[in-house]
Image (spheres, rainbow, N blue to C red):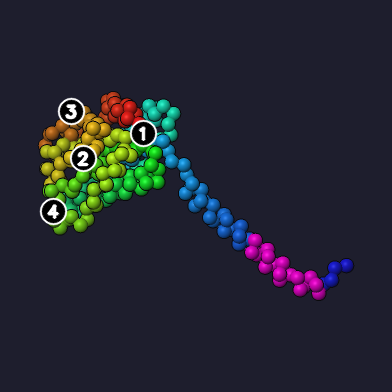
Amino acid sequence: MMDTKLNQAEWPRTAARCFGAVLLTIGAMLLSPAATASAQPCPDVEVVFARGTGEPPGVGGVGQAFVDALRAEAGGRSVEVYPVNYAASGDFGAGIDFARTVVDGIRDEADHIQATAARCPDTKLVLGGFSQGAVVTGFVTSPSVPKEVPAEFLGYVPSPMPPEVANHVAAVALLGLPSEDFLRGYGAPPVKIGPLYAPKTIELCAPEDTICNGAPGGPPNIAHAMYPANGMVGQAARFAAQRL
């Protein structure tokens, strides 16, 4: 028969050992997701895409069509996606408050590009945007802050990306980029693609698309929504794939 007094004496030490083992197990369980996440492999290609006005969070309909088309052209390369985090607001009449939402997108996209270039230097980045998202991505490539930006707003605008970041960007695809006349109609500066990005940039505008074809500012027509169906998404994807 076991000695009851001995068991009573040993029990606190045994319980402490068991409790410690449980804590270690729980700690390992809590830490393992973070370790797994940090160990995610870098993709061959990453698409960084800014959706159009009023589209729900994500890459939007045009963006998803572009991603699907690029994956089909990527020749077996792994293709991951980062949707630019910004409001894609349609409140164009809100003045500086609306401008802040666009700048938020520029900052988010530029920060992500630079972080990815540092973490995954061999990953080829493909930047893209549709409509307002094309404005966001276009400004991300700029080597300087547009001179039209009011002085009181300069403190909110992020600094341009370092020139060496361009080495990590394989292609830029802009679909339905609002024209200079359209942007000036809302008090916004025109988009100027930076010289380091211009040779690897494709800008596509459907002929009847009044947002990008130079027509006076106004609501979009049906042509502005037809990029997944008019062949231009595929054209942009082929352009990008050829530069991977």
Q: Is residue 10 above or below residue 140?
A: below
Q: Residue furthest right?
A: 1
Q: Is residue 14 shown in magenta?
A: yes
Where is mark 1, residue-wise?
A: 67
Q: Earlier in the sequence, mark 1 or mark 3?
A: 1
Q: Is residue 230 above or below residue 103?
A: above
Residue type at mark 2: give it.
Answer: Gly
Where is mark 2, residue-wise?
A: 194
Where is mark 4, residue-wise?
A: 150
Instruction: Select label 2 or label 4 by which is in front.
Output: 2
Q: Secondary structure at mark 3?
A: loop
Q: Give me the disc on residue 208.
A: 3
Q: Are marks 2 and 4 in contact (CB under 8 Å)?
A: no
Q: Quick one: 178 or 216, which is closer to the camera?
A: 178
Q: Is residue 111 shown in magenta?
A: no
Q: Residue furthest top?
A: 231
Q: Residue at x 15, y 47 (%)?
A: 146
Q: Secondary structure at mark 1?
A: helix
Tell me the quarter of the picture where residue 53 sits: top left
Q: Give coordinates of residue 219: x percent, y percent.
A: 18, 38
Q: Are marks 1 and 2 in contact (CB under 8 Å)?
A: no
Q: Quadrant of the C terminus?
A: top left
